[in-house]
């Protein structure tokens, strides 16, 4: 009776959860691969017929479609479900065919299977094959690539005595492109003591489009990382509620006209000799480039202020107060862009958030207004009401976690003063150049080719993903070397000479500049989770090879910058 009751509960759970639709990126994901090493059938999770209303017929993939296929005169005897949910189908759909169903909850979300999970998988498969030699073992996670590949390859190494390189290659042959997340490859090669042979992850499959394919097991789940908030600023907590994360990310992306899954803020490009001419073609304003931490801020309502970092993590920041111009209430759905700096005065650190752009006021988009208008909005709708509230005793800034100010932009003719010693001494935080804002351009998320940043050539840098490998280039001695990886390029963009200090940054994002013709490590970028794009890295490399010096910049602005009649 208990078994029947549990079965009914399982079927009801599947029916209710089917209303959520298929997992993200599931429809166009290939259904299944070939049999691996004569033993394992890798495939994406099938969905019960209860999903048919939300899955077009040509994309349907049910448990029966797996079980009724032919596998070289072999039959499936064991079915292993690695997903961390029960919503996709009922286990009864497997067991009524006489197939043994086993579930190993495997989280995904960027977490490789633990050693305990690997041991459980290996033991389960060994025991089954001892009793059922020649049987096929069907294995799936959500999409059937990274978790599935990790465990199948582990079995082949542990039980069949394969090398991890051979196992990964066999899995890639049967289920192309194989394991395609770099952190999974790094971890499995590390576990089997073959770190130096770790391959570079293949290009993301077209159907996937984003890094976090091992998600989607709860309705439209969102990746949440444990993130350190802005140099330890107090009174903040990371948001982990998926509905809140999704709502805020979608709002920010929509306002900024940004379709990607990453941080939707506008990204400046490095100034070089190929784009400095833009300063002569249209009106620009200029500001100093603060060496702070980039955040968007969403003033959601009176009691909800959120900060969004460059990893698209979201933080709740209580204790900040904002007001409508008449002080009657707080603004709502107001989105600004800025950076958190640490001002130092008389040995005391004062964190301050410098707002330099605004994208929405009370739910109304302002991204298409000129920058002149957006500047005025920042002052009149955000800064002035706070100052008035302070005068009327409605705001106590000393109780807030950090200060809030507008970051000023000036006429382009002021660039020489902004780079001069008098101004730099007056600024209480670190600076590393200037930013040129086109006055008549709208705000748009992603790379903005007219939004220019200039750094002294010796400070121009690229954020790379570091992979430490054995040097196999012709003429090398097989020593370790750092592969500098960028987004959008399968091969290393360049290399960096290894030092003892660099070893701890393997697999991390590092900022590098060029000194004496070679890349030099500056710092780890803990605020970023992906390297610069190939295009950005190439542009910075060109700016280093053919630099715009400070004297070049000042001369060009003085002689050629655009002036309205």
Image (tube, rainbow, N blue to C red):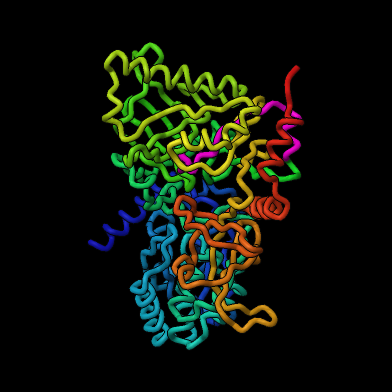
Could you tell me which residue is drawn at 35 percent across and 75 percent down? Answer: 120
Q: State which quarter of the image contains the C terminus.
A: top right
Q: Position of residue 299 (x, y in %)?
A: 40, 28
The residue stretch that appears in magenta: 276-295
Q: State which quarter of the image contains the N terminus.
A: bottom left
Could you tell me which residue is drawn at 37 percent across and 83 percent down? Answer: 127
Report whether residue 386 is seen: yes
- The correct choice, above or below, for 21 with respect to 90 in the image is above
Report whether residue 137 is seen: no
Q: Would residue 284 be counted in the magenta stretch?
A: yes
The residue nearer to you, when weighing 256 against 352, is 352
Q: Position of residue 559 (x, y in %)?
A: 76, 31
Q: Position of residue 523 (x, y in %)?
A: 48, 57
The residue nearer to you, when weighing 541 against 444, is 541
- The correct choice, above or below, for 55 with respect to 428 in the image is below
Question: Residue 192 occupies which quadrant of the picture?
Answer: bottom left
Q: Residue furthest left?
A: 2
Give the side of residue 400 with respect to residue 357, left or right: left
Give the side of residue 511 with respect to residue 97, left or right: right
């Amino acid at each position: 009776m208990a078994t029947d009751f549990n079965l009914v509960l399982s079927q009801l759970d599947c029916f209710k959860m089917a209303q959520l639709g298929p997992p993200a990126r599931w429809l166009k994901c290939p259904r299944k691969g070939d049999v691996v090493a004569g033993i394992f059938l890798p495939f994406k999770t099938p969905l019960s017929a209860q999903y048919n209303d939300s899955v077009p017929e040509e994309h349907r993939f049910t448990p029966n479609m797996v079980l009724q296929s032919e596998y070289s005169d072999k039959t499936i005897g064991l079915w292993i479900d690695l997903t961390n949910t029960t919503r996709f189908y009922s286990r009864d759909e497997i067991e009524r065919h006489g197939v043994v169903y086993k579930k190993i909850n495997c989280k995904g979300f960027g977490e490789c299977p633990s050693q305990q999970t690997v041991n459980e998988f290996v033991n389960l498969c060994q025991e089954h094959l001892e009793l059922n030699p020649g049987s096929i073992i069907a294995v799936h996670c959500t999409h059937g690539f990274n978790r599935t590949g990790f465990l199948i390859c582990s079995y082949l190494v542990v039980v069949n005595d394969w090398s991890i390189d051979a196992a990964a290659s066999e899995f890639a042959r049967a289920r192309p492109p194989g394991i395609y997340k770099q952190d999974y490859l790094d971890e499995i090669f590390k576990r089997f003591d073959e770190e130096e042979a770790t391959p570079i992850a293949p290009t993301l499959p077209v159907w996937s489009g984003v890094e976090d394919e091992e998600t989607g097991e709860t309705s439209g789940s969102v990746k949440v990382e444990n993130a350190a908030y802005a140099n330890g600023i107090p009174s903040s907590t990371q948001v982990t509620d998926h509905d809140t994360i999704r709502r805020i990310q979608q709002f920010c992306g929509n306002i900024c006209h940004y379709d990607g899954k990453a941080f939707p803020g506008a990204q400046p490009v490095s100034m070089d000799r190929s784009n400095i001419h833009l300063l002569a073609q249209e009106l620009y304003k200029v500001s100093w480039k603060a060496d702070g931490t980039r955040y968007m801020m969403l003033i959601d309502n009176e009691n909800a202020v959120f900060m969004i970092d460059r990893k698209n993590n979201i933080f709740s920041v209580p204790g900040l107060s904002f007001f409508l111009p008449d002080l009657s209430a707080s603004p709502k759905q107001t989105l600004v862009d800025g950076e958190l700096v640490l001002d130092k005065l008389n040995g005391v650190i004062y964190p301050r958030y410098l707002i330099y752009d605004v994208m929405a006021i009370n739910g109304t988009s302002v991204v298409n207004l000129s920058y002149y208008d957006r500047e005025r909005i920042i002052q009149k709708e955000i800064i002035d009401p706070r100052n008035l509230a302070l005068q009327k005793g409605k705001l106590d800034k000393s109780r807030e976690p950090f200060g809030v100010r507008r970051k000023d932009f000036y006429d382009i003719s002021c660039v020489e003063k902004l780079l001069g010693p008098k101004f730099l001494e007056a600024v209480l935080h670190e600076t590393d150049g200037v930013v040129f804002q086109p006055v008549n351009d709208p705000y748009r998320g992603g790379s903005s080719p007219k939004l220019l940043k200039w750094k002294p050539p010796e400070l121009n840098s690229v954020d790379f993903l570091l992979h430490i490998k054995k040097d196999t280039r012709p003429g090398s001695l097989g020593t370790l070397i750092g592969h500098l990886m960028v987004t959008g390029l399968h091969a290393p963009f360049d290399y960096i000479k290894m030092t003892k200090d660099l070893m701890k940054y393997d697999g991390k994002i590092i900022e590098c500049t060029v000194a004496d013709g070679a890349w030099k490590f500056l710092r780890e970028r803990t605020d970023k989770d992906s390297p610069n794009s190939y295009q950005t890295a190439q542009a910075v490399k060109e700016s280093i090879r053919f630099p715009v010096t400070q004297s070049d910049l000042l001369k060009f602005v003085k002689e050629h910058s655009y002036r309205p009649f």
